[in-house]
């Protein structure tokens, strides 16, 4: 590919998630992609409802460069708006971020995100996929489990930074 990107399209039936919702297959699929592409620095997980409007933009310049990411980060905002006691971190630096998630007026949007390949990502995915989280019966499955597993390597941005689709797991009216 001329963009420097490759695609990986596993199906939810490719992974055993037990009695958990099929959407949990995303986690072992991402671990599989990390094994298949060991030299890849970042993985973009994108909702099947999203449309890439400008494929010439690189993730690095549009989102991941330290100063750019710091300007996009939502700081000291409720993770589950409007009044959650759990807030986004206000002290994070862009070069220390391993997971970029979006949120809108209704909360976390796990339909599309960027994760940096490395030890932290493997640990995070293993923790996220732990049976304790999968069997807890969170209202929105893996999305709500993310809120519970929140830690200091995660930053939140506005929804439209990564996906502009209102047909993802989230809805709301926050403009980009």
Image (cartoon, rainbow, N blue to C red):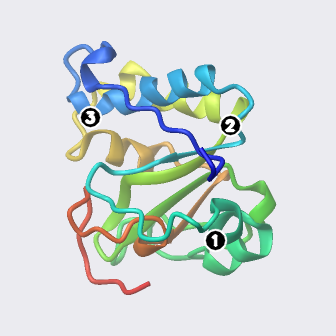
For the image shown, how many numbered marks are present on the structure?
A: 3
> Crowding near pointer 3: few (<14 within 10 Å), some, many (20+)?
few
In-image side of 8 versus 56 (left or right): left
In-image side of 96 versus 107 (left or right): right
Label 2: state its secondary structure. loop
Q: CA distance from mark 1 to mark 2?
A: 18 Å
Where residue 123 sits: x, y (%)?
63, 28
Q: Which residue is mark 3?
A: 23
Going from N to C along the chain, the mark reached first, 2 or 3, is 3
Residues at badges 2 and 3 in contact (C-beta under 8 Å)?
Answer: no
In-image side of 4 versus 50 (left or right): right
Label 1: state its secondary structure. helix
Label 3: state its secondary structure. helix
Q: Which residue is mark 2?
A: 117
**Residue at horizontal 27 percent and vertical 83 percent from the top:** 173
Q: Nearer the viewer, residue 14 or 175?
A: 14
Q: In the rendered image, which quarter contains the N terminus?
A: top right
């Amino acid at each position: 590919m001329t963009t420097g990107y490759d695609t990986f399209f596993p199906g939810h039936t490719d992974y055993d998630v037990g009695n958990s919702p099929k959407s949990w297959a995303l986690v072992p699929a991402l671990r599989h992609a990390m094994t298949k592409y060991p030299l890849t620095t970042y993985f973009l997980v994108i909702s099947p409802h999203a449309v890439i409007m400008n494929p010439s933009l690189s993730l690095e310049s549009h989102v991941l460069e330290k100063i750019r990411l710091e300007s996009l980060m939502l700081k000291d905002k409720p993770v589950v708006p409007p009044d959650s006691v759990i807030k986004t971190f206000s002290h994070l630096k862009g070069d220390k971020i391993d997971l970029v998630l979006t949120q809108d007026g209704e909360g976390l949007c796990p339909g599309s995100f960027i994760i940096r390949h490395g030890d932290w990502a493997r640990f995070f995915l293993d923790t996220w996929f732990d049976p304790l989280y999968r069997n807890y019966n969170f209202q929105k499955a893996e999305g709500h489990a993310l809120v519970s597993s929140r830690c200091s390597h995660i930053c939140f941005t506005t929804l439209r930074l990564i996906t502009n689709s209102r047909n993802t797991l989230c809805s709301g009216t926050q403009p980009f």
